[in-house]
Image (cartoon, grey):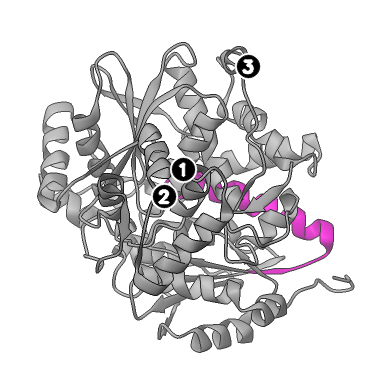
């Protein structure tokens, strides 16, 4: 299997090349040339297996035989050995047919840990095989940065630079990025919003000279391996609830469209998913797009769910590519229109294809707070604001007799002010993070200018190759 760009003008790559490249040279995103297929019999065979065993089965076809089987198994075991729950992504029942999938049992209490812990090990392997170092850059609206820094801290073959919007992430999220003592970690507080951070990362990838000089690689969900790793928990959850012999629906708090796109991938691979429901906050570009057929950017509003305060959903490009029957020229035209006029029209057939697989809903700030309060009062279960958006939207989209699973993307203690304001409870950090808010911070405030960011990275990155190795 190889990987092709959504814009059709970059070379097809093998797994390790796509992993280290991140963004395609034509500005597009890599997707597998074909979707591995799992029959109902093969999915039934996953019953009773551990998360790690299922991960190996589901992910192996994507690696193209480039990683020895024993090595890949060890990577998976090591990555998920960092989690504090044996199920990795356990289910909690909150109603007759309503479930929450807890994705916050990793080291930084967010769903990003699921992919990031594996991604770091995959990159280490690929770089060591080549005798190279890489400069990792990432943009974060909160959770990606902490998860990436934790996963890559102290790794000899990578320097990591995370851009986050200054003053626009929660205090816990900021400390998870700024208190690492590892010499290869650099946190950059950008005077702007998340879209500014993401645009800077894309601009660095599109600057060929800089990209080659520092051997740039990415950890945002533009990197296919991030999406790939997230496919696994759709399979583990569906199997736990009776799949493939009954259909399951999923509601996903959505900003950059990566997490829910992983669900779409699972469906394309043969997992019987009924509905994939996009849940947005007041930055509801995706809900509006499904309703109107037009992707139209507006100004970003600050909300209690900062990880979803986004107007440019990068991974939506991957869905467009599929909806247009993999016609890269149509994707290029849409992305050019987005760049020139902040929006684009989706063709009628493509829109029909998207609406066949997806539903969408939004939650206002008032509805988020009320959902946190009501859920806790009725069930004793505490939600963070992002997960509350999912639960609220799920409640409007449920079908009788079809289990509805909401992805809980972060631990409530990452957003204590919003949770306390909603229900009066101050959620405590787990004991291993109890001193987080007292740790010393280390970060650089920087203007949202490409030259300033590239200069800083160029000064602190350690170069392309390890001692004695040829590129």
Residue 184 sits above or below residue 305 on the image: below
Which residue carries the number 1 mark?
261
Is residue 242 found left or right of 55 in the rendered image? left
- Label at residue 42: 3
- Label at residue 207: none
Which of the two discs, 3 and 2, labels the residue nearer the N terminus? 3
Residue at image x 25%, y 33%?
Answer: 394
Judging depth in this view, the residue of 452 and 73 nearest the camera is 452
Q: Quadrant of residue 402?
A: top left
Is residue 348 found left or right of 38 in the rendered image? left
Q: Quadrant of the C terminus?
A: bottom right
Magenta stretch mostly in which secondary structure? helix
Which of the two discs, 3 and 1, labels the residue nearer the N terminus? 3
Question: Does dot 3 land on a helix, a strand or a loop?
Answer: helix
Residue 345 inside the magenta-drawn segment: no
Question: Does dot 2 land on a helix, a strand or a loop?
Answer: loop
Residue at image x 57%, y 39%?
Answer: 80
Is residue 84 found left or right of 307 in the rendered image? right
Question: Does dot 1 land on a helix, a strand or a loop?
Answer: helix
Q: CA distance from mark 3 to mark 2?
A: 28 Å
Q: CA distance from mark 1 to mark 2?
A: 6 Å
Which residue carries the number 2 mark?
257
Q: Quadrant of residue 141?
A: bottom left
Q: Which residues are magenta?
A: 109-135
Kindly check if marks 1 and 2 are in contact, taking CB atoms under 8 A apart as contact: yes
């Amino acid at each position: 299997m190889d990987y092709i760009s959504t814009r059709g003008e970059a070379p097809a790559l093998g797994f390790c090349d796509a992993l280290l490249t991140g963004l395609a040279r034509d500005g597009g995103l890599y997707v597998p040339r074909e979707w591995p297929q799992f029959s109902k019999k093969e999915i039934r065979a996953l019953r009773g297996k551990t998360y790690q065993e299922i991960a190996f089965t589901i992910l192996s076809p994507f690696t193209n035989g480039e990683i020895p089987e024993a090595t890949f198994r060890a990577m998976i075991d090591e990555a998920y050995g960092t989690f504090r729950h044996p199920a990795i992504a356990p289910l909690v029942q909150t109603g007759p047919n309503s479930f929450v999938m807890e994705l916050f049992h990793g080291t930084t209490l967010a769903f990003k840990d699921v992919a990031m812990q594996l991604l770091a090990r995959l990159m280490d392997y690929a770089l060591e095989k080549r005798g190279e170092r890489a400069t990792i850059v990432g943009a974060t609206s909160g959770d990606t940065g902490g998860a990436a820094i934790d996963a890559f801290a102290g790794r000899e073959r990578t320097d990591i630079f995370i851009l986050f919007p200054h003053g626009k992430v929660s205090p816990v999220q900021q400390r998870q990025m700024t208190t690492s003592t590892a010499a290869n970690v650099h946190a950059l507080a950008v005077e702007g919003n998340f879209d500014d951070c993401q645009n800077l990362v894309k601009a660095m990838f599109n600057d060929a000279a800089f990209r080659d000089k520092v051997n740039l690689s990415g950890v945002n969900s533009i990197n296919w391996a991030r999406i790939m790793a997230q496919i696994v928990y759709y399979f583990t959850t569906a199997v736990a609830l009776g799949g493939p012999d009954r259909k399951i629906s999923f509601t996903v708090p959505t900003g950059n469209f990566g997490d829910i796109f992983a669900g779409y991938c699972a469906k394309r691979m043969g997992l019987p998913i009924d509905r994939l429901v996009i849940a947005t906050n007041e930055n509801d570009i995706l809900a509006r797009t499904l309703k109107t057929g037009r992707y139209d950017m507006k100004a970003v509003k600050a909300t209690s769910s900062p990880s979803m305060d986004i107007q440019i959903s990068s991974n939506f490009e991957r869905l467009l590519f599929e909806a247009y029957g993999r016609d890269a020229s149509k994707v290029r035209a849409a992305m050019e229109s987005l760049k020139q006029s902040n929006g684009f029209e989706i063709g009628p057939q493509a829109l029909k294809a998207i609406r066949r697989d997806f539903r969408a809903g939004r939650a206002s700030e008032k509805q988020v707070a009320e959902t946190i309060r009501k859920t806790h009062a009725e069930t004793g279960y505490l939600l963070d604001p992002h997960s509350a958006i999912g639960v609220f939207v799920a409640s409007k989209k449920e079908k009788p007799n079809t289990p509805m699973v909401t992805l809980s993307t972060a631990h409530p203690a990452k957003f204590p002010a919003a949770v306390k304001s909603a229900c009066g409870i101050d959620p405590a950090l787990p004991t291993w993070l109890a001193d987080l808010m007292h740790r010393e911070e280390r970060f650089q405030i920087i203007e949202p200018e490409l030259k300033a960011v590239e200069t800083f990275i160029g000064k602190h990155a350690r170069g392309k190759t390890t001692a004695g190795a040829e590129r």
